[in-house]
Image (tube, rainbow, N blue to C red):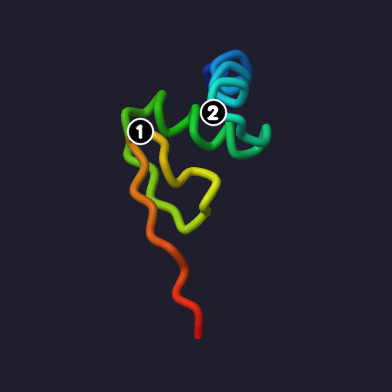
Amino acid sequence: MLEMPDQATPAATLGIRHQLAMADALIYATARDQNATLWTQDADFKDLPHVRYFPKIQS
């Protein structure tokens, strides 16, 4: 069976540090763990390191 890395502790730490909801903290922690840039339109991530934020276009 493939073992998944434990993201709970890093996610909790990042969530507290950046005032993120738990689901957002898990997304961010996973991206950081994979050395990935997080591309998003979610303003909750807007000013975080390693995030590319593009605001939604209002029609």
Look at label 2 and name its amino acid: His
Q: Disc 2 or 1, which lies upstream in sequence?
A: 2
Q: Which residue is the site of mark 2?
A: 18
The answer to whether the residue labelled 2 contacts the one labelled 1, judged by CB atoms less than 8 Å apart, is: no
> x%, y% of residue 39?
38, 50
> x%, y% of residue 21?
67, 36
Mark 2 is surrounded, within 10 Å at the Cα level, by few (under 14), some (14 to 19) or many (20 or more) other residues, namely some
Q: Is residue 57 left or right of residue 25?
A: left
Report whether residue 54 is seen: yes
Dividing the picture into quadrants, the one containing residue 24 is top right
Seen at 44% across and 46% down, the residue is 46
The correct choice, above or below, for 44 with respect to 50 in the image is below
- Nearest to the observer: residue 44 or residue 23: 44
Q: Is residue 40 left or right of residue 16?
A: left
Seen at 60% across and 26% down, the residue is 15
Mark 1 is surrounded, within 10 Å at the Cα level, by few (under 14), some (14 to 19) or many (20 or more) other residues, namely few
Helix, strand or loop at mark 2: helix
Seen at 50% across and 86% down, the residue is 59
How far apart, in angstroms, are the residues tagged by discs 2 and 1? 10 Å
> x%, y% of residue 2?
53, 21
Seen at 44% across and 53% down, the residue is 40
Report whether residue 3 is seen: no
The correct choice, above or below, for 53 with respect to 11 in the image is below
